Amino acid sequence: MRKQFVVLFLLVAFGFAGSFAQTEGGAPLDNIFEKEHMQNRRPVPYPSLREADILWSKRVWRIIDLREKINLPMYYPIQQKEDRMNLVSVLMEGVQYHGLPAYSNADDEFKVKISYAQVNEAMGATDEVTLVINPDTGEEEEIVATRDARIEEVKQIMVKEVWFFDRNYSRMDVRIIGLCPIREYANEAGEIQKRQTFWINYEEARDILARHEVFNSTNDAQRRSFDDIFIKRFFGSYIVQETNMYQDRPIESYAVGIEAMLESERIKNEIFNFEHDLWEF
């Protein structure tokens, strides 16, 4: 009995000391547990592919509109909130601090690398010259101020991906090749402009995306990572381009309005029907 009392006393004492040290040594924990799982996550490797196993493939480009309800977790929060960041902030942090390569928006083949300063400039962090009157001299003077990157202006993400039929597993599958944030802003004339900013190779970004969580509206304890969102296709999108003989021209170059939407659906159905037509009973 005495031995049990001593053990109980020691457990209580060590627990009190631990909580006291936590309170005295740093900020209190704003949760009932410390989050460690997401910080240590690694992306699940892709299965290996052989050229001989790819029976059919189709490269397509699609747009994820961040204003759609299903895609809002990629857009918010605009400013970092606790341990959550939006998708564009995660990509820019990866370029700035974690050695993630960024590529020019001139093409989507990842041939021309660009610096973080060029990424910042593409995101609207440019120098602005303002004329102000010096109260001492009464003369106009130029003041140069650098704007912050306009994260909130990124309203769309372009996704480059390859759909393929793997006869080794007898299934249709898809792999994302690259991501490109698209800014939507008003120019000096008040006209709405869209601009592709920079490309990120998805394979190179997976390790970073897997360590940042996305808000889950149904369960705060089970939040997905950005890698989960893309791999499991938890997003809404529409196709804007496919590989074709006309230098891979986009749909908007030959169709507008309802015709463009129908063309997008045609490409999607073509991919679905290819797999469906392979199975006959």
Image (spheres, helix red, strand yellow):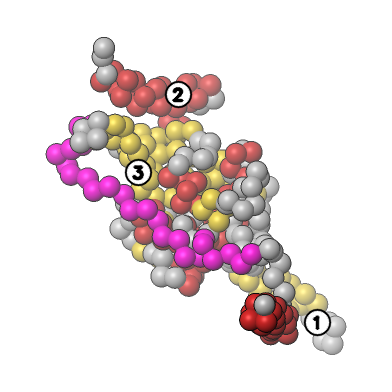
Q: Which residues are magenta?
A: 33-58
Disc number placed over residue 265 in the picture, else none: 2
Work out whether residue 245 or residue 83 is closer to the camera in this orientation and state it: 83
Work out whether residue 18 or residue 151 is closer to the camera in this orientation and state it: 18
Give above or below for 3 relative to 225.
below
Give above or below for 74 relative to 267.
below
In the image, taking residue 280 as reference, residue 139 lies left or right, namely right
Quarter of the image where one finds residue 137: bottom right
Instruction: Answer few, some or many: residues within 10 Å of disc 3's Cα (few below 14, many 20 plus, some between 14 and 19).
Output: some
Badge 2 element = helix
Q: Is the C-beta separation of discs 1 and 3 under 8 Å?
A: no
Badge 1 element = loop
Indicate the amino acid at tag 1.
Asn
Indicate the amino acid at tag 3.
Arg
Quarter of the figure that contains the C terminus: top left
Instruction: Answer few, some or many: residues within 10 Å of disc 1's Cα (few below 14, many 20 plus, some between 14 and 19).
Output: few
Q: Residue 215's x, y, as percent?
A: 62, 51
Quarter of the figure that contains the N terminus: bottom right
Looking at this view, name the residue that lies furthest to the left: 52
Instruction: Answer few, some or many: residues within 10 Å of disc 2's Cα (few below 14, many 20 plus, some between 14 and 19).
Output: some
Q: Is residue 38 visible?
A: yes
Residue lying at 41% horizontally and 26% vertically, measured from the top left: 268
Indicate the amino acid at tag 2.
Glu
Q: Is residue 195 visible?
A: no
Work out whether residue 121 or residue 59 is closer to the camera in this orientation and state it: 59
Spatial CA span between label 2 and label 1: 60 Å
Looking at this view, name the residue that lies furthest to the bottom: 136
Disc number placed over residue 134 in the picture, else none: 1
Disc number placed over residue 175 in the picture, else none: 3
Looking at this view, name the residue that lies furthest to the front: 1
